[in-house]
Image (cartoon, rainbow, N blue to C red):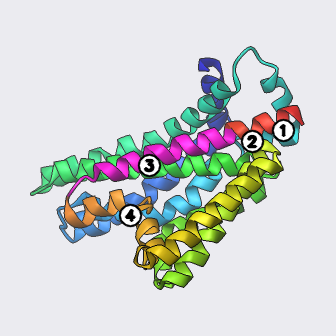
Amino acid sequence: MRGIYKRELKSYFYSMIGYVFIAFLVAFVGIYFMAYNLNMGYPYFSYTLSGGLFILLLAIPILTMKSFSEERRSKTDQLLLTAPVTLGQIVWGKYLAMVTVFAIPNLIFCLFPLIIKASGQAYLKVDYWAILAYFLLGSTYIAVGMFLSSLTESQIISAISTFGVLLVLYLWNGLLDFLPTNAGGNLAGVLLIWSLLVFAVYQMAKNWILAAILEVAGAAAGVAVYFLKPAWMEGLLPEVFGKLSLSNGFTSVVNDRLLDISSLFLGVSVIALFVFLTIQTIQRRRWS
């Protein structure tokens, strides 16, 4: 895995993508830093960093779009798949290389709270918590973008699809207002989501018997709950999806000055999930 990691990390700086990515993030956050912290004298860098959330939607797709799409387009993925390393080591090596590139601007951000402290009052603990949450959120976005890159050989499609998914994640809390709150609407939503999950299982296992059993069992359970305990269905989707917001960990630091451990655990879990899905996607193509 070390060889894959070094190879990928060097490729980002040989192609200038790494330099552009780092400069883009630092310059954008730096503008907010000068405006809010230096000119207006606001003591929290965490508030300034919140202005850099949207820029991740533009920067992360640029970083991840070539991770596997370029390999498929140039047919060099066959060389990787026949290398004396496991598929998991390949995927983790690529992922950690991208996270390393993303870590560099975050390390630079660590200097900004010290500049604030040198100029006056500062809240270092909150600011560094915010940087940690920002780094974890970006690392989660990278895992999502890497998975989408593994689905296509076009870097453009990979970048656009990653931007679209990240935009949905960015607007997640606002989109929850459109979800139904009554029991019937939530039952329909639960059944639809369950069907999509069963379809994903079928695509990976290619076993229609297993898919049919899961579909029937899930539908029966949902209908049973609806008739026996309809109150459980009311507001179920907004409540569940509200807890799955990836940005909650960062916003809790910015707004409440608290580090939400559960949100950090959610971020790590999502990273592991999308790395696993990436491995399964490549594994399926490997034997197809």
Inspect the magenta stretch and tell me whether residue 130 lies in it. Answer: no
Q: Distance between the residues labelled 1 and 3?
A: 27 Å
Inspect the magenta stretch and tell me whether residue 263 lies in it. Answer: yes
Q: Is the C-beta separation of discs 2 and 1 under 8 Å?
A: yes
Q: Residue furthest front?
A: 228
Q: Nearer the viewer, residue 59 or 184?
A: 184
Which region is colored magenta? 258-278
Q: Is mark 1 on a helix, strand or loop?
A: helix
The quadrant holding residue 57 is: bottom right
In this figure, which residue is indicated by the disc labeled 4? Answer: 31
Mark 3, mark 4: which one is toward the viewer?
A: 3
In this figure, which residue is indicated by the disc labeled 1? Answer: 285
Residue 198, given in percent of the width and then of the height, sits at: 70, 56
The type of residue carrying mark 1 is Arg
Residue at point 51%, 58% (across, down):
56
206 horizontally vs 132: left or right? right
Q: How far apart are marks 3 and 2 (CA)?
A: 21 Å
Q: Distance between the residues labelled 4 and 2?
A: 40 Å
Q: Is mark 3 on a helix, strand or loop?
A: helix
The quadrant holding residue 157 is: bottom right
Q: Nearer the viewer, residue 166 or 44?
A: 166
In this figure, which residue is indicated by the disc labeled 3? Answer: 267
